Amino acid sequence: MTRTIWFLTSNAGKLKEATHHLQPLGYTVRLLNVDEGAIVEPQVDTLEEVAQSKITQALNHLPEGEQSEDMVLVEDAGLFIDALNGFPGVFSAYTLDTIGCSGVLRLLNHLQSEDTIQCAQLRSAEFQAVAALWMNGQILYGNGICPGWIALESSGDDGFGFDPVFIPNDLDEFGEPLPSGTYGEKSAHGKTFGAMPIEEKQYYSHRSRALNDLLRQLPSA
Ligand code: ITT
């Protein structure tokens, strides 16, 4: 029997990725539908605080007939750019809505180099994700980080959000991210998340890592 995970999100890209990750592991991921404006995202300093607030609010919106073994998931992510002292971070959604990917590229326009390694170092950034899962009255948290760098220009139609401007760092033979500009066993070859299929993004993604971190904590895992 598959277990149902109700995912509270307004982001279709996040739902698609979480489903892609969790379905093969035997979970049924369903969108937890709430009225627009029913969930308030607090303006706080950390992704953990946002995730905690959202999961607490989500519990008030569980659908009728929910089974006792059902679980509830929220996930909060952000893009942290080193040269901007971590901006946009917890302001990522607002930044995407206002200046967008092109605005982020403009902010980094002065940081360029002919040398790819140097360019990656100057424009280094990371995606962070915190996933919170409610089960049996308990809340578990999982963290995931994906280091990389901001491309010189937008590319690719896949993915969502900042995917067209984010290039993940290569991975070593254990799947762990390497420092910017280091070649590894698994390489994006300079492609942005937006220029790779979802299957490839999953290897690097902060979201996959946060979900794996959560799954490791489940009693049956
Ligand atoms: P929720 O309803 O689940 O909160 P959201 O779109 O507000 O959805 P987040 O607050 O988690 O999502 O994300 C902040 C911003 O970062 C948002 O604009 C996302 O599109 C973007 N983002 C998050 N994960 C991303 C990813 O894997 N690739 C590209 N952009 C991403």
Image (cartoon, grey):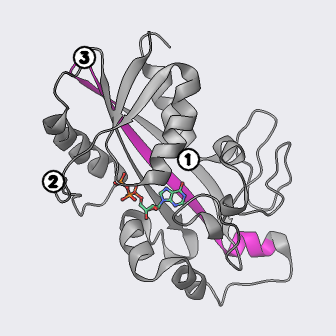
Secondary structure under the numbered disc 1 in the rendered image: helix
Mark on residue 206? 1
Q: Which is closer to the viewer, label 1 or label 2?
A: 2
Read off the residue under disc 3.
67
Residue 203, quarter of the rendered image: top right
- The residues colored magenta run 118-140
Image x and y of residue 89, in percent: 43, 65
Mark 2 Cα shell of 10 Å, populated few (<14), some (14-19), many (≥20): few
Mark 1 Cα shell of 10 Å, populated few (<14), some (14-19), many (≥20): many
Q: Is residue 17 above or below residue 115?
A: above
Q: CA distance from mark 1 to mark 2?
A: 27 Å
Q: Is residue 134 left or right of residue 201?
A: left
Instruction: Report the residue at 20% width, 58% height from top.
Output: 36
- Circles 1 and 3: CB distance less than 8 Å? no
Of labels 1 and 2, earlier in sequence is 2
Q: Is mark 1 within 8 Å of ligand 1?
A: yes
Q: CA distance from mark 3 to mark 2?
A: 23 Å
Of labels 1 and 3, earlier in sequence is 3
